Image (cartoon, helix red, strand yellow):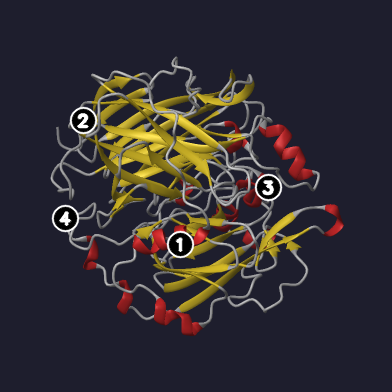
């Protein structure tokens, strides 16, 4: 049947189908996004459910799978989801942020279609509209290695996803109103592990079970909006094996600081007396510590978990030292058969250095957060769509911030914040945090080498302290108070890509920007055309579609 592509559909579970084509396999999902009532901290409140689940369903995929995911928005507000850490090669159309996508209006649906190309690892998805992320709609997204590509550890007995988050009992609409009225968010009400917090009254159901002597993989992600969370398991150590898409040197830890938006994979062996044990997540760097517990049960266990919880570390020097212990596993295979360390990032000449300094402003009674003095606002027409339709000049200006801001950030300007970036340039980005609070930054479309985090302010002389050999390639990096962080990357993925604070109050109030990476050829080799089903809004509504890219 030359010229005819065959597809076989296999039903996997509710809302999921697997399709096998002449190309890479397809996974099909149908997701209904609704409000529902849950009591994660013992008080009934409105949450956002996906297919009646809180947190949302796990996406279980394998390198190069094509994901086709139809989202029905049954909320009363526009809605979008982003796939944090999925690189969306040549395809920022599927990124699910307001700079690339028109939101899905209430009562309508949109089908995302993307490939998890040449990636492995542990990630999360979450809403990017309003303060929806504070109400749910988040979940785990795993990309397994293909069977032919070896991983640097034996297959675990089972593979578990652990979603941690700080949590407010106020609704997302109330939190949004606080911010719109010029107030900042108070500390969260509590902490959740997979949407729950064990009461410790002997009636808690286990989150996970383990067979004695067996080893399990736990993928631990912080989907919260404000707080670093320290994660630990009573009586058990954790062997770190992967973070955000990279195999790492397999150090053993008693606890891990998981900063907002970050994910780790660890191996845990059931080598203790058979009974219940608590996994614990608690807030860091706050005077008042909030703690959540969840039960791990040995299958032949007899006896409750000890009420004595393992203690968390104190102070951020400990956390900085932990960051410095993370190393890329240079000999492990990547998502493709070549070793991870075959990319010698430390010997490439830097073509551009961008320093991003975060600041806050309360001028005119309005709270805004900024990068290099510009507080980003999303125009009605998404930046990428305006650029594609050739009307960028009617929607935003490029390069309104300098690569090197002056020592004193002046008055904060509120406008779209878009940087032009030369395709395939190798760039150094410095995140400098002059504030007393933690920061965590994420870059869509790429992974980057996290080469340094240090106290103080950055100067070019600090480059001598960079890790130029085995820094981990990842997608999210924390910046401690009064400190800086440095990352390296090649901007080789054409599209419009969001750099944002993961502290959602700060993102919502402007601490984000976009990087426009255009291929000079405007060719399908470098970037896909706008999808036929793309939602159009703002100034492009009714305009004829531009001439499509060709090879």
Which sits earlier in the primary sequence, circle 4 or circle 1?
1
Which sits earlier in the primary sequence, circle 3 or circle 2?
2
Observer-nearest residue: 527 or 430?
A: 430
Q: Tell me the quarter of the image containing the C terminus.
A: bottom left
Whole-percent x, y for residue 325 in the image: 34, 62
The residue wearing badge 2 is 6
| In this view, the mark in front (1 or 2) | 1
The Cα–Cα distance between marks 4 and 2, rounded to whole angstroms, is 28 Å
Q: Is residue 167 visible to the viewer in this orientation of the structure?
A: yes
Q: Is residue 71 above or below residue 422?
A: above
Q: Quadrant of residue 61?
A: top left
Observer-nearest residue: 392 or 507?
A: 507
Density class for disc 3 (Cα within 10 Å; few <14, some 14-19, many ≥20) is: some
Q: Which mark is residue 380?
A: 3
Which sits earlier in the primary sequence, circle 4 or circle 3?
4
Q: Which mark is residue 337?
A: 4
The Cα–Cα distance between marks 4 and 1, rounded to whole angstroms, is 32 Å
Query: Do tag 4 and tag 2 residues touch (Cβ < 8 Å)?
Result: no
């Amino acid at each position: 049947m030359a010229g005819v592509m065959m597809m076989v559909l296999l039903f996997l579970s509710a809302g999921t189908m697997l399709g096998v084509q002449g190309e890479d396999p397809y996974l099909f999902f149908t997701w209904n996004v609704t409000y529902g009532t849950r009591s994660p901290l013992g008080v009934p409140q409105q949450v956002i459910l996906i297919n009646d689940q809180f947190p949302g369903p796990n996406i279980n995929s394998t390198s190069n799978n094509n994901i086709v995911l139809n989202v029905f928005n049954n909320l009363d507000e526009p809605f979008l989801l982003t796939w944090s850490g999925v690189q969306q090669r040549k395809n920022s159309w599927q990124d699910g942020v307001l700079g690339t996508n028109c939101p899905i209006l209430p009562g309508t649906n949109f089908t995302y279609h993307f490939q998890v190309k040449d990636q492995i690892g542990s990630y999360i998805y979450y809403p990017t509209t309003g303060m929806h992320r504070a109400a749910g709609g988040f979940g785990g997204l795993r990309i397994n290695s293909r069977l032919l590509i070896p991983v640097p550890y034996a297959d675990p007995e089972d593979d578990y996803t652990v979603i941690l988050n700080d949590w407010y009992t106020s609704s997302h609409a109330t939190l949004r109103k606080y911010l719109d009225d010029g107030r900042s968010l108070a500390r969260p009400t509590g902490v959740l592990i997979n949407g729950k917090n064990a009461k410790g009254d002997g009636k808690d159901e286990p989150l996970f079970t383990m067979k004695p002597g067996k080893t399990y993989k736990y993928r631990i992600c912080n989907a919260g909006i404000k707080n670093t969370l320290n994660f630990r398991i009573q009586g058990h150590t954790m062997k770190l094996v992967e973070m955000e898409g990279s195999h790492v040197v397999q150090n053993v830890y008693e606890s891990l600081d998981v900063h907002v938006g970050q994910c780790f994979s660890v191996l845990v062996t059931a080598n203790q007396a058979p009974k219940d044990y608590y996994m614990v997540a608690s807030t860091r760097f706050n005077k008042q510590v909030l703690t959540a517990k969840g039960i791990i049960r040995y299958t032949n266990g007899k006896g409750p978990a000890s009420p004595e919880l393992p203690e968390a570390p104190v102070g951020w020097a400990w956390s900085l030292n932990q960051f410095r212990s993370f190393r890329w596993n240079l000999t492990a295979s990547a998502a493709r058969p070549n070793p991870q360390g075959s990319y010698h990032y430390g010997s490439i000449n830097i073509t551009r250095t961008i320093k991003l300094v975060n600041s806050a402003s309360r001028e005119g009674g309005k709270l805004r957060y900024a990068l290099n003095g510009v507080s980003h606002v999303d125009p009605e027409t998404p930046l990428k769509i305006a650029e594609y339709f050739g009307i960028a000049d009617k929607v935003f200006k490029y390069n309104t911030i300098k690569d090197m801001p002056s020592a004193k950030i002046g008055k904060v300007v509120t406008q779209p914040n878009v940087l032009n970036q030369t395709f395939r340039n190798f760039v150094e980005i410095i995140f400098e945090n002059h504030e007393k609070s933690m920061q965590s930054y994420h870059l869509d479309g790429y992974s980057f080498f996290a080469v340094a985090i240090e106290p103080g302010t950055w100067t070019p002389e600090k480059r001598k302290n960079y890790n130029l050999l085995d820094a981990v390639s990842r997608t999210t990096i924390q910046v401690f108070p009064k400190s800086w962080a440095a990352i390296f990357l090649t901007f080789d993925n054409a599209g419009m890509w969001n750099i944002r604070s993961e502290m959602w109050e700060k993102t919502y109030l402007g601490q984000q920007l976009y990087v426009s990476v255009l291929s000079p050829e405007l060719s399908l080799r470098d970037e896909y055309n706008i999808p036929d089903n793309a939602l159009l809004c703002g100034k492009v509504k009714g305009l004829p579609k531009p001439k499509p890219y060709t090879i």
